[in-house]
């Protein structure tokens, strides 16, 4: 009966044969039981062969699809007992399936539902999505049940990610709160941890099946394999779940531990297969509500959110559940016994970090799990934009228009890469860290706006100490650098004590630093009436935030188009005794500790500020625009954005100030405001500008094209820009 080791070495074994071989060669005193088990497996295999040899069933019995076009070729009887796929599922094991999974149609859409609320969950879910996208070979449709925060973040992320054959829908979790808010819940997930109970009402009525996932899941295989398990549902089975891998529901973890009722060890709801149409027919809403109401009379609250209620329903109705093998949800919670449910880590398909400790759990294979997780955490998401060949998909008009625009560019143009960068869509993750701030009600509030890359992280703490108001920052990072930034921020008491700093990650792509795109991203997330447009290597004077707010009132900013200029200075010293007042600053200027910004290399950039007048000024004064003027200004939130054609070094701020002037903004210098540039190593872009002649030629070309655009947009008034440039 057993397969010999000679046969094992002679040819690769089928999964069933390998299973038999392992069973026959386990050392121990259970030989008789093993032989009975092997005989049962062989009998099952014979039954399967007989079933597969029968003529195909009538196409009238269909497996419920995941939508209008999903899986129309798969058969499944209504009771699920006469289907060959159902027969294959007769025995559930903890090892890999002995029988080959039924194939999922190449172009069948797989539907995934995820409840995601808040800033941290929005960040965590990206790792799950990456792991799914990495392995997938099918179109995907994500259904996110979100609060307004997560929807804002994830809608922007997917819009800029532009992954082919991926569709995303959002459902307002706030509208669902009343459905579950009556259930007291002790779990850290709060009210959102109960929302999987109402998916039959939330998701579209024509959606017939869906995979439901927690945000702390990592896939190690193609999600289509899990989707194929729907073919194994029989009878009235409507829920696919993995057994709980801790002793929680056995009630023996500690003295007086009293869990909700469950069938045996109970089931974990981190991964659920839902047959939505059958659940609706079974009146699922009424079923779980009645069960919850009954149990809450004695239990008073849930400890594990929706999982407690799912298990209580299954305890009363065991026929509802199809037990999945444990490798579809290897749970790494506290008190886990997950390592007892599998033989080898290569069998595992889904890892579930369902402990508040996350990566710090105890498990003999935890290093393997951690490395798998970190791989996707730092994986370049741009690589997941690969096409699914041979599958028709809905037209993505944004992608179509982008390709059309790019195709119109001349690839032989020496400045092609510059022009292309203007249209590059950079994957963007807004509010990478928790953000909590509401603008002051007096309509004078100001947000500091800046952008940076990894080499300027050291400036963040200093800026936070100098500016107590809200800050909006765009960071240009790779996926791996984003995780380095996260660790840096979470290790900083200064940064963690600030809830009013919005960190927005723009992921690296292309060869240029998209400085103006970064500025625009940061500007777009400003939620105050005014914004101070700064750079990351400047420290604003102490108290500048409150000074600017007072200036809003004094200079009637609400009713006038003004750009308030904050004079810029610089030091060549890495250690500076920062001046606490204008008088101190003037003293340091006279001693040569400070200088007016770029006085020795680019005087024109700030000369119109008129530093000589500023020294003695006690009231704000107006200055006129001049060629190459690029001051740092405070403006209204509805001011024009920066022109994206300028990347890297050169003319990126100059063009913006020119546009403000064209729109008739007044430039008003504040008499008691200042900011100081701190020294740092030259950026890669300025080095490239200085050493690459073609770079400078292209910048000059882009300048001329911008000025021509200005003359077309603003007419006669814009002629002065052409004249000023020619005379400068």
Image (cartoon, rainbow, N blue to C red):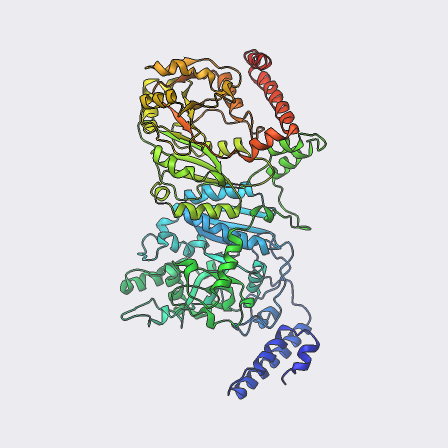
Quadrant, the N terminus = bottom right
Q: Nearer the viewer, residue 643 or 511?
A: 511
Q: Could you say where residue 196 lies in the image, as x and y percent from the top left?
A: 43, 56
Left or right? Give the position of 481 relative to 21: left
Q: Nearer the viewer, residue 199 or 497?
A: 497
Quadrant, the C terminus = top right
Q: Could you say where residue 720 lies in the image, as x and y percent from the top left?
A: 55, 12
Which residue of the protein is positioned furthest toward the right in this rendering?
412
Residue located 61% across and 41% down the image: 396
Residue located 59% across and 84% down the image: 39
Does the rendering let one see residue 428? yes
Q: Could you say where residue 185 lies in the image, as x and y percent from the top left?
A: 32, 57
Quadrant of the image occupied by residue 420: top right
Left or right? Give the position of 393 relative to 298: right
Position above or below: 703 against 397? above
Does the rendering let one see residue 277? no
Q: How many marks overall?
A: 0
Q: Nearer the viewer, residue 398 or 316?
A: 398
Residue located 59% across and 76% down the image: 19
Q: Could you say where residue 598 lies in the image, as x and y percent from the top left?
A: 48, 23
Which residue of the protein is positioned furthest toward the front in this rendering?
591
Left or right? Give the position of 179 relative to 699: left
Quadrant of the image occupied by residue 360: bottom left
Position above or below: 132 against 385? below
């Amino acid at each position: 009966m057993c397969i010999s080791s000679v046969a094992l070495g002679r040819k690769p074994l089928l999964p069933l044969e390998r299973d038999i071989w392992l069973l026959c060669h386990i050392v121990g005193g259970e030989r008789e039981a093993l032989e009975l088990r092997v005989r049962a497996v062989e009998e099952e295999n014979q039954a399967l062969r007989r079933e597969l040899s029968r003529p195909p069933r009538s196409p009238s019995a269909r497996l419920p699809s995941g939508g209008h076009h999903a899986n129309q070729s798969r058969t499944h009887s209504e009771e699920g007992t006469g289907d060959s796929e159902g027969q294959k599922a007769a025995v559930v094991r903890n090892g890999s399936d002995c029988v080959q999974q039924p194939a999922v149609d190449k172009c069948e859409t797989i539907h995934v539902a995820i409840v995601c609320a808040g800033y941290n969950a929005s960040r965590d879910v990206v790792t799950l999505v990456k792991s799914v996208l990495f392995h997938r070979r099918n179109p995907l449709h994500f259904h996110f049940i979100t609060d307004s925060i997560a929807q804002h973040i994830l809608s922007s992320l997917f819009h800029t990610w532009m992954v082919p054959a991926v569709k995303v829908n959002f459902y307002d979790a706030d509208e669902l709160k009343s459905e579950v808010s009556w259930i007291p819940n002790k779990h850290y997930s709060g009210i959102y941890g109960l929302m999987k109970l109402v998916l039959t009402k939330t998701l579209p009525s024509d959606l017939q099946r869906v995979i439901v996932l927690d945000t702390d899941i990592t896939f190690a295989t193609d999600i289509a394999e899990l989707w194929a398990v729907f073919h194994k549902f029989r009878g009235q089975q409507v829920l696919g779940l993995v057994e709980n891998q801790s002793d929680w529901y056995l009630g023996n973890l500690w003295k007086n531990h009293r869990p909700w009722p469950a069938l045996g060890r109970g089931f974990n709801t981190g991964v659920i297969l839902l047959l939505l149409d059958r659940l609706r027919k079974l009146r699922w809403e009424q079923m779980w509500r009645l069960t919850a109401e009954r149990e809450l009379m004695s239990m008073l609250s849930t400890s594990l959110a929706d999982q407690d209620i799912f298990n209580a329903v299954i305890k009363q109705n065991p026929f509802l559940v199809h037990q999945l093998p444990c490798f579809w949800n290897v749970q790494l919670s506290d008190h886990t016994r997950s390592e007892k449910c599998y033989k080898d880590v290569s069998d595992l398909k889904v890892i579930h970090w369902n402990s508040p400790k996350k990566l710090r759990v105890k498990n003999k294979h935890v290093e393997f799990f951690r490395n798998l997780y970190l791989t996707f955490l730092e994986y370049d998401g741009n690589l997941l934009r690969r096409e699914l060949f041979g599958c028709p998909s809905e037209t993505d008009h944004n992608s179509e228009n982008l390709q059309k625009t790019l195709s119109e560019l001349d690839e032989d143009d020496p400045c092609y890469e510059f022009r292309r960068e203007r249209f590059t869509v950079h994957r963007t993750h807004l509010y990478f860290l928790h953000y909590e701030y509401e603008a002051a009600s007096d309509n004078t509030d100001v947000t500091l706006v800046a952008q940076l890359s990894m080499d300027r992280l050291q400036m963040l703490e200093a800026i936070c100490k100098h500016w107590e108001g809200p800050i909006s920052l765009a960071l240009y990072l790779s996926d791996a650098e984003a995780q380095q930034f996260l660790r840096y921020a979470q290790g900083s008491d200064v940064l963690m004590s600030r809830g009013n700093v919005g960190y927005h990650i723009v992921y690296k792509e292309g060869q240029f630093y998209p400085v103006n795109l970064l500025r625009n991203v940061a500007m777009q997330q400003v939620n105050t009436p005014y914004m101070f447009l700064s750079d990351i290597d400047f420290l604003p004077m102490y108290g500048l935030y409150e000074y600017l707010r007072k200036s809003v009132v004094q200079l009637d900013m609400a009713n006038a188009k003004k750009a308030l200029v904050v004079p810029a200075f610089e030091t060549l010293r890495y250690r500076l005794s920062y001046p606490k007042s204008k008088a101190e600053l003037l003293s340091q200027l006279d001693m040569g500790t400070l200088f007016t910004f770029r006085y020795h290399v680019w005087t024109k950039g700030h000369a119109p500020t008129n530093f000589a007048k500023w020294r003695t000024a006690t009231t704000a004064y107006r200055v006129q625009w001049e060629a190459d003027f690029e001051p740092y200004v405070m403006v209204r939130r509805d001011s024009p954005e920066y022109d994206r054609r300028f990347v890297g070094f050169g003319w990126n701020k100059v063009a913006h100030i020119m546009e403000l002037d064209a729109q008739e903004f007044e430039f008003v210098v504040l008499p008691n405001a200042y900011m100081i540039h701190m020294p740092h190593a030259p950026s890669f872009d300025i080095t490239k500008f200085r050493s690459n002649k073609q770079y400078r030629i292209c910048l000059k070309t882009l300048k001329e094209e911008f000025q021509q655009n200005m003359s077309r947009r603003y007419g006669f008034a814009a002629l002065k820009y052409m004249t000023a440039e020619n005379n400068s």
